[in-house]
């Protein structure tokens, strides 16, 4: 019974993940995944808490993946039961969970090691904690101790593959954004068995450095933390122009990842030769970001054709005409938009590491609790009023009505920002357009844009 429940639950959560929560799901490098039945440890960067694990869970649909994740997620009994049904296991950390709890890892690693030798897969995040920026932290060697303990017990007969992957997101927090898994070339642990038997620590350090290097090369790793906010803002704004100059599509996440990596590499290359220019650019970018945030507009409003009053009236009329459909779509989905807010507001008000839980909390609350409850109640009402056929059709359409309501809301917010931009252009944003043009022109002049050419 538990197997059937687990299979149905994974199918349901997978549909919510791939078709509803995310707008686009990309998987690049699928050809690097070893054949099914190959013992494999998947090693990933960690920036979006629960969402990282889910992206791998539903990216590797053809096999069960045992996933180690932070132990504090397992404190609540109902949540612990749900997590275990998705093959999630707690990983205890010395700094966060205390010395006494780390002993539990030995037992769990033995379970995972036996699974490995049977040809299954294990996912581990060796950074141990999620990062709060697009950068890569230090790796612990726990995944290698798991692997070598398993093969040592097996007499070094089984080859275990270490598969480096990268999770990447267009936005960490928002609904209907894009997620991407990038798969690197696997490393064969068998090549290191001889070295491990004579120098185990050296073997682990060598492999760990190699795996971390492969992940670092695949991901956007903004190592200039002193200027991180300015660089990240330029990536989101000037980065669209840079991506097009490199031959990519800035609206396609795999292209954008490669061009963002190239943009940061370009900035790093000129940081000594154009130090004064970069200081001026970074200061200007932060000034521009502050002005846009204060006036509640977006950078892309600068690139839009100056909106006419007639255009605004037509947009407003369109929204008014569609308002009844919006209300019809919103009513059964209203609680899904509202329920996570008390939790996400508290997380956003905390430190930046806590804010990285926002996406996972939204997904978990709505997928596991609010969604099933609200949609079940709606089904009961529909059956009572209209009968089973109409009730089932309405049930299937409910999440898509929710997506439409979300898009309507986005359209309304976009119109408000355009109107606000028109009002603030010569007030709160006075001088910002000229500043932006100077920043972008200076970047055009000092950057090579030859670090990446579209190959995807």
Image (cartoon, rainbow, N blue to C red):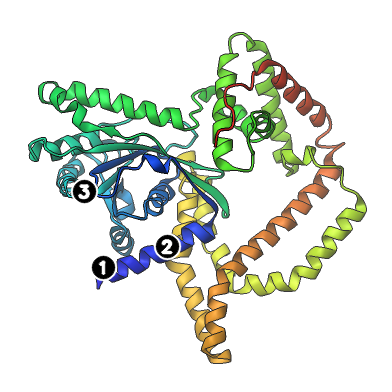
Q: In terms of secondary structure, where does tag 2 sit?
A: helix
Residue visible at 26% across and 42% down?
40
Q: In this orientation, which residue lies closer to the viewer: 180 or 51?
A: 180
Residue visible at 65% across and 18% down?
447
State whether residue 223 is above or below residue 61: above
Q: How many marks?
A: 3
Q: On the rendered structure, is 135 left or right of 428?
A: left
Q: Quadrant of residue 100?
A: top left
Residue visible at 55% across and 33% down?
455
Question: Which quadrant is the C terminus positioned in?
Answer: top right
Q: On the rendered structure, is 312 left or right of 132?
A: right
Question: Which quadrant is the N terminus positioned in?
Answer: bottom left
Callout 2: 10 Å neighbours few (<14), some, many (20+)? some
Q: In this orientation, which residue lies closer to the viewer: 32 or 237?
A: 32
Give coordinates of residue 35: x percent, y percent: 29, 46
State whether residue 309 is above or below residue 156: below
Which residue is denoted by mark 1 in the rendering?
Answer: 3
Residue farthest to the top?
Answer: 273
Q: CA distance from mark 2 to mark 1?
A: 15 Å
Q: CA distance from mark 2 to mark 3?
A: 25 Å
Callout 1: 10 Å neighbours few (<14), some, many (20+)? few
Callout 3: 10 Å neighbours few (<14), some, many (20+)? some
């Amino acid at each position: 019974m538990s197997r059937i429940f687990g299979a149905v639950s994974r199918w349901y959560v997978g549909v919510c993940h791939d078709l509803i929560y995310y707008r686009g799901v990309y998987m690049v490098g699928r050809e690097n995944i070893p054949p099914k039945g190959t013992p494999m440890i998947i090693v990933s960067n960690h920036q979006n808490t629960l969402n990282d694990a889910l992206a791998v869970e539903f990216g590797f649909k053809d096999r069960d993946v045992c996933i180690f994740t932070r132990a504090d997620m397992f404190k609540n009994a109902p949540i612990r039961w749900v997590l275990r049904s998705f093959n999630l296991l707690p990983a205890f950390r010395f700094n966060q969970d205390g010395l006494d709890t780390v002993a539990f890892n030995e037992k769990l690693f033995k379970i995972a090691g036996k699974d490995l030798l049977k040809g299954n897969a294990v996912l581990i995040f060796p950074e141990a904690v999620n990062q709060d920026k697009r950068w890569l932290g230090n790796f612990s060697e726990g995944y290698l101790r798991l692997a070598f303990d398993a093969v040592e017990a097996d007499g070094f007969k089984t080859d275990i593959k270490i598969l480096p992957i990268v999770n990447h997101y267009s936005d960490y927090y928002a609904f209907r954004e894009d997620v991407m898994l990038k798969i690197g070339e696997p490393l064969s642990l068998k090549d290191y068995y001889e070295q491990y038997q004579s120098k185990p620590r050296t073997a682990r350090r060598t492999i760990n450095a190699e795996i971390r290097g492969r992940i670092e090369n695949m991901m956007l790793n903004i190592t200039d933390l002193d200027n991180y906010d300015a660089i990240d803002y330029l990536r989101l704004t000037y980065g669209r122009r840079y991506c097009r100059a490199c031959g990519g599509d800035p609206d396609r996440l795999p292209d954008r990842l490669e061009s963002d990596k190239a943009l940061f590499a370009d900035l790093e290359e000129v940081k000594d030769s154009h130090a004064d220019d970069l200081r001026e650019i970074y200061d200007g970018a932060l000034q521009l970001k502050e002005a846009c945030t204060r006036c509640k507009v977006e950078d892309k409003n600068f690139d839009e054709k100056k909106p006419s009053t007639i255009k605004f009236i037509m947009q407003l009329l369109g929204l008014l005409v569609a308002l009844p459909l919006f209300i019809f779509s919103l009513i059964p989905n209203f609680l899904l938009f509202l329920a996570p807010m008390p939790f996400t507001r508290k997380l956003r008000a905390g430190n930046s590491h806590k804010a990285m839980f926002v996406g996972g909390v939204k997904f978990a609350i709505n997928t596991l609790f609010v969604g099933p409850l609200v949609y079940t109640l709606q089904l009961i009402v529909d059956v009572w009023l209209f009968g089973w056929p109409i009730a089932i059709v309405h049930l299937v359409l409910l999440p898509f009505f929710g997506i439409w309501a979300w898009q309507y809301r986005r359209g309304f917010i976009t119109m408000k920002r355009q109107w606000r931009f028109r009002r603030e252009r010569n007030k709160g944003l006075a001088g910002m357009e000229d500043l932006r043009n100077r920043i972008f022109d200076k970047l055009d002049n000092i950057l090579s844009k030859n670090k990446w050419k579209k190959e995807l």
